Image (tube, rainbow, N blue to C red):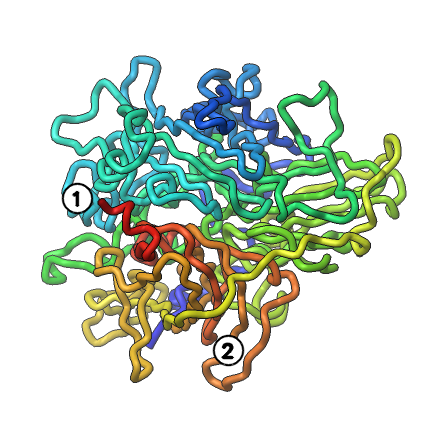
Amino acid sequence: MVINPCLTIATLIAIPAVASAQLPGGTLDPSAVPKFETPLLIPPAMPLTGVIRENRQRIEYYEIAVRQFEQQILPAPLPDTTVWGYGSVQHPGTVAEGGTFNYPAFTIESRYRVPVRVKWINDLVDEDGRYLPHLFSIDQVLHWANPPGPRDRKGTAQEPYAGPVPMITHVHGAETHEESDGYPEAWYLPDAVDVPAGYFETGTYYDVFKGTSHLGDQWSAGSAVFEYPNEMYATTLWYHDHTLGMTRANVYAGPAGFYLLRGGPGDWVWGRLPGPAPSLDEEPDTSHHEIPIVIQDRSFNADGSLYYPDHRAFFEGLDADQLQIPFEPDPAFGGASDVPGIWNPEFFGNTMVVNGNTWPYLDVEQRRYRFRLLNGCNSRFLILRFSVPLPFVQIGGDGGFLPRPVQRDDILLAPAERADVIVDFSGLPVGTTLELLNIGPDEPFGGGTPGVDFDVSDPGTTGQVMQFRVGPRNGCDWSTPPMYLWLPHLRGPGRVDSTRRLTLNEIESETVLVAESGEHIRLDPTGVPFAPVQALLGTLEADGSSTAMTWGAPITETPTVGDTEVWEIHNFTVDAHPIHIHQVQFKILDRRDMATGDVRPSEPWEDGFKDTVIAYPGEVTRVKMRFELPGLFVWHCHIIEHEDNEMMRPYRVLPGCDDEDDDD
Ligand SMILES: [Cu+2]
């Protein structure tokens, strides 16, 4: 029997549902944070380090580091916040200091078939070159990078990891070669002066890919050089950390940014889209009408620091002094607990941070805007709508434009999903203020209707996202009314060569059994399993059973270059999971109810290419894609807490006949 993680405690100790109340978090009360005081930051374009000419080809070159700095995320005079973020090493310092280091990062603006080459530098060191420890508690008993060793294996130490931080950057949705994809075991430590003796400074696959990459001779201590061919359809991508077993904490600390690809056949729009977006050669004081917006839930402490739970008790809603559950190995329990003590199965912050500020506002003109929406939350599904009747017209998704514009009142976004939307403020009177609301749940999402199948987010905090203030139009709006746009025809993945049947599974604790005892739960060998210990991907057997597999199990998905495959994702858990497949953009075919057999087509707003799909509980979700590049990649759940604890699998694209020469 699978227990819904969000129901575990309610079921066991009858605490009423807290969905529409304020969520617990750090020591800062989110309702004490003034809203709509900070203007929305519009991330500028990331400055180039240089342009390289190679074989008559133009390559755009960046040197981008991750650093630690202070940023005013809460509105002043609340304290500033220590975060991590990317920036151009040739333009050091934060935005407040005139530099480029920011959370979220500046936007990489790229062009079709103009490769982008990035030296990604892990620069989490202090002024003296000593490593900076993590901002949050890293659970060493997960299958994780584990620099102290055994490398890329489970550790045994119960205390949080205090050493130098491994990082590896992945451009989400990009079609690139294996050595540039940010494989979770290709991490590297900063080039610090005090890396403890005996520590591994690189992940297992850093060394492999340094050997095979044509840029491997440029990889130096604390860095790797990746290249993105940009031969895919124009779309909204984003870059973030992907280190094995600690992505949740690395991303939560801040390093993420947009990567926009423009031009080529995927950008042939009949009509004119609202613009411009920030660019490198713009005039000062340019008004932007194309704006990327990343929404992330965070919690804070009263000193301004980010809060992320350091104990499993947080997820269970248990006070530490009531704690009777042996998360750590416990002699009373035969010396072993299979419940990781620090890792939390999901995390929901109690504030909304948009482009790096809590609850900002944006002054808009009475005209159309193009917003590139990204759900950058760890676990939270968002359902966005305006506080006044005002539709979104969605024109694009993860992997490019939709076949036709789709008008929507609500935008559902799972973690990592993007929506390219046009919003027309021209019909609203000058002086109107309206809010972007979130009516998704403050807990794991399982589908259904807000307010009917689940409680909506706390209207006082996480139910609000940002504010828009309508002012007069400045000049003419030359953009095409969105429903008159003709969007490009994008070629599909072609004839299907084979089908794989895959599964999503939740694994319950086998060692921790509990029973209710007043307000407490207590250990009871005759009780019920305490809680989920992990979620796993797997394969469906011929008899309908599921073989759940961990990250370390042998590779089972091995498509061949040039093949088009259908992956059927059978979700045997009680929650929806956003499943992301690296290297490819796929089409969603349909979803089948496992109980009734009813089949429904993909949603109109999912009709373009996708790299992340919501797999609902009790359904079989079918996606179809063509594999173009040989090599080692991953597919995983993008609830990052799940991804970090085994809900990720490697897959290998085998070379086709034409590629055999490459193996010599
Ligand atoms: Cu998941």
Residue at (45% x, 34% y) in the render: 255
Disc 2 residue: CB within 8 Å of ligand 1: no
How would you rate the neighbour count of disc 2 (Cα within 10 Å): few for under 14, some for 14-19, many for 20 or more?
some
Spot occupied by residue 212 in the image (x, y as percentages of width and height):
27, 38
Quick one: quadrant of the C terminus? top left
Element assignment for label 2: strand
At 26% across and 56% down in the image, what residue appears? 551
Q: Residue furthest bottom?
A: 596
- Residue pictured at 31% horizontal, 70% vertical: 539
Which element type, helix, strand or loop, lies under badge 1? loop
- In front of the other: 510 or 658: 658
Quadrant assignment for the N terminus:
bottom left
Tell which circle, 1 or 2, labels the residue nearer the N-terminal end. 1
Q: Amino acid at mark 2?
A: Arg
Neighbourhood count class around disc 1 (C-alpha, 10 Å): few under 14, some 14–19, many 20 upward: few
Let me know if residue 222 appears in the view: no
Discs 1, 2 touching: Cβ within 8 Å: no
Q: Position of residue 28 (x, y in %)?
A: 50, 38
- x, y (%) of residue 369? 75, 42
Instruction: Give the residue at mark 2.
Output: 592
In the image: residue 522, left or right of residue 9: left
Question: Could you tell me which residue is drawn at 88 percent across and 35 percent down?
Answer: 476
**Residue 114 visible to the viewer:** yes
**Count of marks placed on residues:** 2
* Dot 1 amino acid type: Ala
Image vertical order of residue 313 relative to residue 334, above or below: above
| Residue 361 as seen in the image, left or right of residue 76 | right
Marks 1 and 2, how far apart at CA? 43 Å
Q: Nearer the viewer, mark 1 or mark 2?
A: 2
Q: Using the image, tell me which numbered label, if any, was put on residue 157.
A: 1
